[in-house]
Image (cartoon, helix red, strand yellow):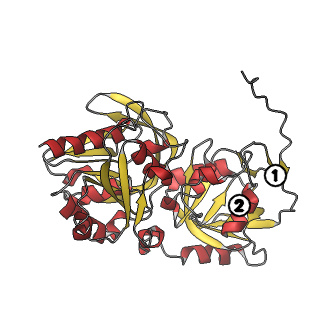
Amino acid sequence: MAPPRTRGRLRGNVTRTERQPARLALEDGLVLTGRGFGADRETIGELVFNTSITGYQEILTDPSYRGQTVLLTQPHIGNYGVNGEDEESGRLWLSGLIVREAARRTSSFRAVGDLHEYLVQHGVPGIERVDTRMLTRRVRDAGAMRVLITRDLDSSAETLVERVRSAPSISAEDHVAVVTTPQVIEWTRSHESPFAARSPGAAGPEALRLRVVAYDFGAKRNILRSLVASGFDLTVVPANTPAEAVLERDPDGVFLSNGPGDPAVVDYAVRAARALVQKVPVFGICLGHQILAQVFGATTFKMKFGHHGGNQPVMDLQTEKVEITSQNHSFAVDPERLPESVEVTHVNLNDHTVEGLRHRELPTFSVQYHPEAAPGPHDALYLFDRFRALIEGARCS
């Protein structure tokens, strides 16, 4: 028997680059000075705050953050570095990063680089040594607003604020069209990872593999891994794929992924989903949930400051169990226009917004939160099993 593995003290890697002054400007007129890190360029995005204590690399690589500048409320960010296994996509999508302190030392055996160089590599600017607690409270009180990060130390505060106010809103662009895959991808068991979120009741390797077409509106890799771990073989298609092209593949089910931006902009996705729900079982997460709500006649609205973090309590109204969930969305479904044929299955216990839907007649359901992120850690993984059971039931009928 081999002796137990021991780990020596990790000295870590130190980023020795001197960090230069940078400025932050909000559209409400606030201007702060801090220290810049990451890429040396100017950026404007919609400011959102994320309350997660860990997982900054997953946040940085989540396509749902395109067009947004992320403020992390955890004060010390970057201490465990970065690595290829924690990426949710192949690049960074956010506009910028705001932290209280960006670590200069990495202290993890998994680290292959540090946060500063990671941002430089992907062209994303950051700012540290600003009062993130005050900024978070400002967003909570006033609502979402645009923010500028710049190394420009010469322009007046009024000039910087005017740059922010003249920038387009996040709803002015179809962000999904930018983040989606440009081509069809076969995502099979070869893509599985030991870090895939897997339900304790998930189908074993001997179970029948079911064919699912997954729409990529900005899908996180761990959603796809979790579907594979639940017994699905996936074909990932671009966001604008017509329903007819999907049905030609004869799938057992269709999955609608998460994604960035205003759900009211992606009318092409709503048209495709409207046709698909009449033919095959459909499961949607986050933006996919909002798309299905529009299919059934509901509308969405912009939240004051959204849900971004790994500690949102959600109640399953069928079981009355509470799940601790990971969320990342700035829009929510308005339940007032839902027809009687659609049931609200989950609600947020903080603000009572809609967190889940189920059609009473069609094999279709959705959730607003991210079960694959597994903050519970297993609280919400049953949803992947539910999708499989829904498909198996449809196959038998």
The structure residue drawn at horizontal position 62% and vertical position 41%, both measured from the top left corner, is 53
Q: Is residue 274 above or below residue 51?
A: below
Q: Looking at this view, is 195 or 369 the one in front? A: 195
Quadrant of the image occupied by residue 347: top left
According to the picture, the residue beneath numbered tag 2 turns out to be 118
Residue 343: image quadrant is top left
Please state, as top left, top right, bottom left or bottom right, where the C terminus lies in the image.
top left
Which residue is at a point 28% across and 28% down the rendered structure image? 319
- CA gap, disc 1 to disc 2? 12 Å
Above-or-below relation of 176 to 144: below
- Image quadrant of residue 371? top left
| Image quadrant in which the N terminus is located | top right
Q: Secondary structure at mark 2?
A: helix
The amino acid pointed to by label 1 is Arg
Dot 2 crowding, Cα within 10 Å, few <14, some 14–19, many 20+: many
Mark closer to the chain start, 1 or 2:
1
Residue 169: numbered disc: none
Q: Is residue 303 rendered to the left or right of residue 316?
A: right
Foreground pick, 285 / 303: 285
In the image, residue 58 sits, relative to residue 96, either above or below, namely: above
Does residue 353 appear left or right of residue 249 in this picture?
A: right
The residue under label 1 is: 104
Amino acid at pointer 2: Tyr
**Is residue 334 among what the camera can see?**
yes
Please say if 99 is above or below 323: below
Q: Residue placed at 65% from the left, 47% from the top?
A: 133
Q: Secondary structure at mark 1?
A: loop
Q: Position of residue 219 (x, y in %)?
A: 44, 58
Residue 218: image location, x then y, percent = 45, 62
Residue 88, horizontal then vertical, whole percent: 54, 55
